[in-house]
Image (tube, rainbow, N blue to C red):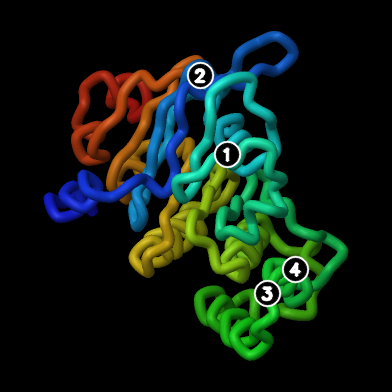
Amino acid sequence: MTDSSHADVRSTQAPLLAIRQLSVAYGGIKAVKSLNLELHEGELVSLIGANGAGKTTTLKAICGLLAPQAGEVLYQGRSIKGQGAWDLVSQGLVMVPEGRGIFTRMSIDENLRMGAYLRKDKAQIEADIESVYQRFPRLKERHKQLAGTLSGGEQQMLAMGRALLARPKLLLLDEPSMGLSPIMVDKIFEVVQDVARQGVTVLLVEQNAHRALEMADRAYVLDSGEVALSGAARDLLGNPQVQAAYLGA
């Protein structure tokens, strides 16, 4: 995805998301330390690293689920410190959490409509629901089924579909392929790439580092809460240090 025109755009535009010197602590232990990271509109950026590197903590701090100890998060050029996750959803900042977070006792259709709970454009909501069903025909077949009875892959489809109903400008994805079959992983990543092609900015946290780097424009490698490496994803894919640590080379 990375090309010179994309780089030129980045050099002239303010970032959609900018993290400046972010630190987040859990019980006295700094999970994230002086982190700097940015995304420009239309980018797909991957965040990779070992378990405990601070990836999920970073996403939670961005979307208002964790309060930073220091530093700031700027979204659309403004600090979003102190804003709740519900406030940020209304501004187009949406997260699909690790573990999916679906409403297990609600139907597929009801879950999708919860994604649009801040919207008033009823006709367009119906069109967007149908669009999700076109992406994920299996959900349409089971649209009245309770979400808790779905397979892991189907639940991931539903979680992504619900997020898309919020019409995100910035979509945060936390381990979307975790626990899924290879066929389902392919489907989920196909949808992620398609969403990015449609102009949604995506920050992807993913244990499958090889797939994450293959599909991203740029990437950051986190190590013990700090950025160890960053750059064009294709460059990191060929980096011997990244290959040894994360790609099994």
Image quarter in which the N terminus is found: bottom left
x, y percent for residue 50: 48, 24
Q: From mark 4 to mark 3, how far is it between C-alphas? A: 10 Å
SS of the residue under disc 1: helix
Q: Residue at x 80, y 60 (%)?
A: 103
What's the residue type where badge 2 is placed? Gly
Label 1 neighbourhood size at 10 Å, few (<14), some (14-19), many (20+)?
many
Q: Relative to residue 12, is residue 65 depicted above or below? A: above
Q: Residue furthest bottom?
A: 123
| Residue type for callout 4 | Met
Q: CA distance from mark 2 to mark 4?
A: 33 Å
- Which label sits on residue 114? 4
Point out residue 201 in the picture as x, y percentages from the top left corner.
41, 55
Residue that badge 3 annotates:
119
Q: Give the CA distance from mark 1 to mark 2.
A: 15 Å
Displayed quadrant of residue 130: bottom right
Crowding at label 2, few (<14), some or many (≥20) Cα neighbours within 10 Å?
many
Amino acid under label 1? Ile
Q: Furthest-left residue in view?
A: 4
How dense is the environment of label 4, judged by Cα within 10 Å: few (below 14), some, or many (20 and up)? some
Would residue 249 appear left or right of 193 to someone viewing this image? left
Which of the two labelled residues, at mark 4 and mark 3, occupies the earlier sequence position?
A: 4
Labelled disc at residue 62 = 1
Cα distance, mark 4 to mark 1?
21 Å
Disc 2 and disc 3: Cα gap in Å?
Answer: 36 Å
**110 relative to 130 in the view: left or right:** right
